[in-house]
Amino acid sequence: MSGLQWGGRFAAAPDAALLAFGSSLADDLVLAPFDVRCSRAHVAALGPVLSAGDAAALRAALDLVAAEIDDGSFAAWATTHGFEDVHGAIDARVRDHAGVAGERLHAGRSRNDQVATTLLLYARDRAVRGARIALDVAAAMEDRAESALERRTLLAATTHWQPAQPVLLAFWLDAAAQSFVRAAERFARVASDAARFCPLGSAALAGSSLPLDRAAAAHELGFAAPTRNALDSVGDRDVALDLLHAAMRAAVAASRPSEELVIWATPAFGYVRLDDAASTGSSLMPQKRNPDPFELVRAAGARAIGAYAGALASTNGIALSYHRDLQETKFQVIHGTEAALTALDAFRRAFAHVHFIDHAMTARAGDGYTVATDLADAVILAGATARDAHRAVGERVLLAEEHGRPLDPSDAAALDVPSAPVDPLGSVLGKRTAGSTHPDAVAASLAATREAITGLSESFL
Ligand code: ARG
């Protein structure tokens, strides 16, 4: 390794395998553009500590490194040289480009400050990305919901996967959209927390005896103010953990409708068809069409959950300030977040390839006696107690089941509620409560969700 940032007090070279064990470069290269921004801000903070010439040389060198990051050559160079982390690699590259001026960049700063600050910039960037995808998904679901509402497509909604009550497909789509909107809101809170306090200038843990202009650095990086306690700043990973938490929750939000889409794509259901673009075949069975993207998204939450547990656990029990354990936290945060956002984006893409087969859904919306609750409600409205109504309708279900027929007007008549709905659409139109599957309630929810999506997009993205 040529990239050591220390050495004066060491008499022997480090063990190569241990040095490699300690390297996070492969995992933290993703932080490179954020470190360049931090390094620029640090040049500003150094102010009078640097001559104007040295400051200009450092800025020019940082511009070169930024260009190398963009074109991929920095990653290739850093990887072949071997560094402990991206921060050391950038510092070394600046020294290559700026000569002696490059040796002045690290005055009054520690990688501890750089890790903490770059993670906040990363959190802002990924939170915006996550919110954007989540809102795109929510908007796509609302679009589908609007047309499904017009077509009055029906669906036997389930609990325990057993037929429960008829609903509008639009109601299901709007339900799925809600959790994506909440995911976007969570990302928005992370982005705003990540713009509050800037750790740069913590100088390892105690602050600096150099006259660093921390406020200038904070403002250049879009923070409201410098952090108030250097010892806390270098060991605080709260926002990074919140980012991973938000990403994990978004992945979990995507996993749940994925489960239904996987089942609905089976011939036994036949409620949806996936385009070829979102399906895969079998290497052996010629007839197969598998909904792999949704199965992978269904599973992706698990990786994010594991990463979140690992990240949080790596901070448990470590003393205040920076300890090397936090390199593991960084690894988990980056890996978990990247994986969750990739899955979220895969869901967005795959969902565009879903076609709902209206007639198949609608035709089976009454299967499994899904109108039984409406009949019971009608019996209650006619004066019966809930228990009596439940029993009486249950007996009609048993009878119908014995005859192998659905509930029909003869059951409504036998229960003395002849005008009660015994068809799925009648059930849906009979709902009266706010938030119900009645078309008017669904339309109201769609409009409110649209407003939330627009509001978030405007205020945040
Ligand atoms: N490589 C470490 C990380 O990425 C930073 C090292 C910070 N400080 C130290 N003295 N080892 O978390």
Image: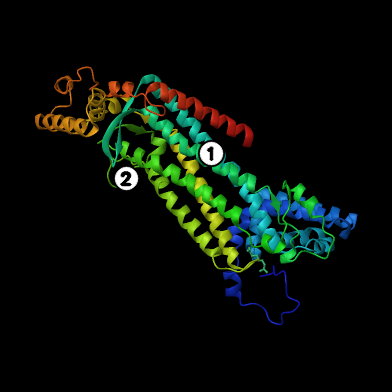
Q: Residue at x 68, y 48 (%)?
A: 196
Q: Is mark 2 within 8 Å of ligand 1?
A: no
Front-lying residue, 29 or 205: 205
Image position of 161 (left or right of 300): left
Residue 293 occupies quadrant: top left
Image position of 457 (left or right of 355): right
Marks 2, 1: nearer the viewer: 1
Q: Label 1 belongs to which residue?
A: 133
Q: How many marks?
A: 2
Q: Is residue 398 above or below residue 250?
A: above
- Earlier in the chain: of badge 2 and badge 1, it is 1
| Percent position of residue 123, x then y | 61, 49
Q: Secondary structure at mark 1?
A: helix
Q: Label 2 belongs to which residue?
A: 282
Q: Secondary structure at mark 2?
A: loop
Residue 461 visible at all: no
User: Disc 2 versus disc 1: distance between alpha carbons?
Assistant: 30 Å
| Percent position of residue 129, x then y | 58, 42
Q: Residue at x 53, y 35 (%)?
A: 135
Q: Quadrant of the C terminus?
A: top right
Front-lying residue, 336 or 442: 442
